[in-house]
Image (cartoon, rainbow, N blue to C red):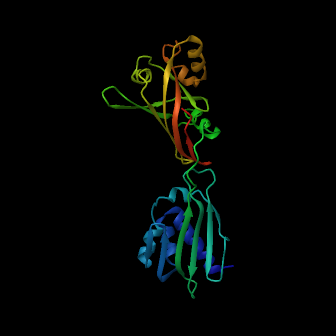
Amino acid sequence: MGSPAMRAAAEAILTAIRTGEYSAARRAETYLAEQPRFRWSRGEASGRDAVFERLVGQWALTPVLGGGLWDTDAGDTANQLVIRGRFPGKGAAPEDYRLTIEFDDQEKVAAITESFTFPKPPAASATMPAYVRRCIDHALLDGKPVTVAFARPGGDVSLSLRGSLQTRDGDTLILWLRNAQGGLADAIRAGRTISFLYRDSASRTTLTAEARGTIVEDAAGRRAIFDRTPEVEQRHDPGLSGAAAELRLLRLSGTTPDGPVLVIPPA
């Protein structure tokens, strides 16, 4: 077990790294040896000034580290403390995150080593997992409407937020379009690829997808899609003058709190 001084130093280092705050980095600096080192996956900083610069500010993982659960008793020795972090409920987060803090004979921080791994790329599945379907189906309710993109005949790209997008099953999306003669409806009729983006910054969930589909013409099919549309979207088209679309998923990929996801339905 480390001494009280070593533990205080480790806590100060952790606070600086997980927050990036200037005041926290200045406090951590008081525990540094004369010639400390900071090693991480992309390089090494040597000297007090360089290590301080690595402790302060917003780095690539800072938004994730701020929400971590920390074990400060993860492998202590006489001159070394190891801190491990876990990030439940966060997508695009590292696995097995560790800070190894080494001390000199005066119990000053001589070296800090940051190490971690990321989840392996997923094997492709044929259908969307439950978490992904929930994200799409609740996107409007959660205040995260899906961004939809398509190419117009001249090559210009159109982007819009669509609150009516839902999943019908594991490889099919449905969508109510208020304007039956609009650009998105025309793109679907023409068989062009439609792209989607969903982002939840709080959980670091990012999903991108491509699909092609058809406009549903029969009354029963139109009604079924309209009835699946969130009520606030239905109220924009009480006369059902819009178009109902059924879209076959071509590919979906992204990151979720459950890990990376890749969906490629069979052709």
Q: Residue visible at 52% across and 73% down?
A: 28
Residue 180 image-quadrant placement? top left
Residue pushed farthest bottom?
105
Q: Is residue 202 above or below residue 247?
A: below
Q: Residue visible at 61% across and 56% down?
A: 87
Residue 184 image-quadrant placement? top left
Q: Quadrant of the C terminus?
A: top right
Which x, y percent locates residue 101? 57, 75
Q: Nearer the viewer, residue 225 or 83?
A: 225
Q: Tell me how many marks there are.
A: 0
Q: Quadrant of the N terminus?
A: bottom right
Which x, y percent locates residue 8? 61, 75
Q: Nearer the viewer, residue 240 or 119?
A: 119
Q: Is residue 247 left or right of residue 130?
A: left
Residue pushed farthest left?
154
Residue pushed farthest front?
267
Which x, y percent locates residue 172? 57, 29
Which x, y percent locates residue 176? 52, 22
Q: Is residue 123 above or below residue 154?
A: below
